[in-house]
Amino acid sequence: MRESFSYKDNVLGVEAEKGWTSILELIPDSEVPTYVYNLKTIKSRIDAYKSSLSKLKTQIHYAVKSNGSAEVLKCFQSEGTCADVVSQGEFKRALDCGFKGSQIIFSGVAKSRKDILFAIENDAYQINIESLAELRRVCEISKSIDKEARVGFRVNPDIPVDTHPYITTGFRENKFGIGLDQVRKAVKILKESESLVKLTGISAHIGSQIMDVDPLVDSAKALKRLAKELEGQGFKLESIDVGGGVGVDYQSHDESLDIQMIKNYGKKLEELFSDFDGTIVLEPGRSLVGRSGILIAKVEYIKNNGFKDFIIVNTGMHHLMRPSLYKAYHSIVPVRKTGENLEKNFDIVGPICESSDVLGFDRVMEEPKEGDFLAILDAGAYGMTMANEYNLHKLPNEVFV
Ligand code: LLP
């Protein structure tokens, strides 16, 4: 059941290491929507990945893009994980939060010369190469400053997955990685460059919010085959990076299922790579932080337009883009249950001047009053990181427990 956030005397609170605290006590300003995080949830997910992979040499590189708040990063750093970043901004934030450059993987299709220089100068663990042109650029920069650069070939294994089309990444239609049949060309570029660029690993990421581990394992198998081929060509890889983690079942309140899925995936990787003597790298984001955060909204109005009932709240697509962008489902619950009012069917909508600004369609819930608070659950991943100030609204506050 729900572990990260739970009700006591009909009030929602955070179940943290020091006991239970009411959400109502945690909100610094009731007029500003607030993300509340439970850091204990994150630790339990890190433990699940670690314990299921205990027989392998593994490195968890937390995907900073899923939640880049400094407190969250410091939590990961103190738990001994590494980081995966996709911009110089994320790289700098990770350094500021205590990660060493040598613990950071730099992914992303559009790295500028300055980004690459920054990564090399900061001894990045690995720059994941997304195109042949990028590889040429890294060779050139490494040569020009006479400094070693550690690169990984990010390949696109062409594996379709059952997730929203905007978040598949390892299908041939997608912009990410180099095709498996381009690896030979990449090797040639590397050999001919006579630079200090070292191929330290290979990686793949096929998409996010994947609820079936089989395609993830298929992608890992493709990487294992590629590692063998490269070994035949004289490249001894230090690591294989299998990409992001598993998804989160947003429809379910049973958090133990998340842990089971993480462990199931971990065990399959452990079996698959039992004969690999390098490091297995994972870059999970959502499965580590998704359940850890909720977004608290204040009810501004209850509205019936003669056709439909709406709950209008002070947060929306600008603070949590996922429902509008991917038609993603997030449970929405009252912070205080009264049991006094009738249940009705509402669309829960925000203040933005667009009809796409709907946080939840057709939600059956007890009718709240103006000034009551609602909690939008499972918003710890890709929530605050994707928030913006559209319509010049303020960004939400953040509270960490
Ligand atoms: N590594 C790479 C190279 C990635 O592109 C991603 C996510 C991850 C790791 C982390 O994947 P995860 O473990 O979180 O599934 N904004 C979207 C998700 C976009 C994910 C993009 N890449 C959403 O809100 O669903």
Image: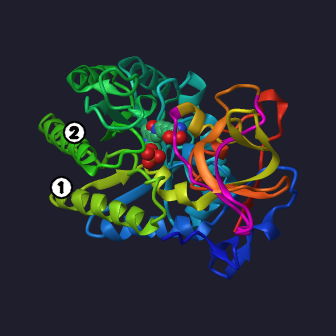
Task: Specify the segment rendered in magenta.
Answer: 326-352
Q: Quadrant of residue 383?
A: top right
| Mark before the other along the chain sequence, 2 or 1 | 2
Q: Is ligand 1 within 8 Å of the beta carbon of the residue shown at mark 2?
A: no
Q: Is residue 177 visible?
A: yes
Q: Is ligand 1 within 8 Å of the beta carbon of the residue shown at mark 1?
A: no
User: Does residue 225 appear to the left or right of 3 in the view shown?
Assistant: left
Q: Nearer the viewer, residue 59 or 123?
A: 59
Q: Amino acid at mark 1?
A: Leu
Q: Which residue is mark 2?
A: 235
Q: Which mark is residue 272?
A: 1
Q: Please state the horizontal and vertical placement of residue 235, each as a whole percent of the image.
A: 21, 39
Residue at coordinates 56% horizontally, 23% vertically from top-left?
112
Residue at coordinates 44% horizontally, 53% vertically from top-left?
248
Q: CA distance from mark 2 to mark 1?
A: 20 Å
Q: Is residue 335 magenta?
A: yes
306 up-or-down from 242: above or below:
above
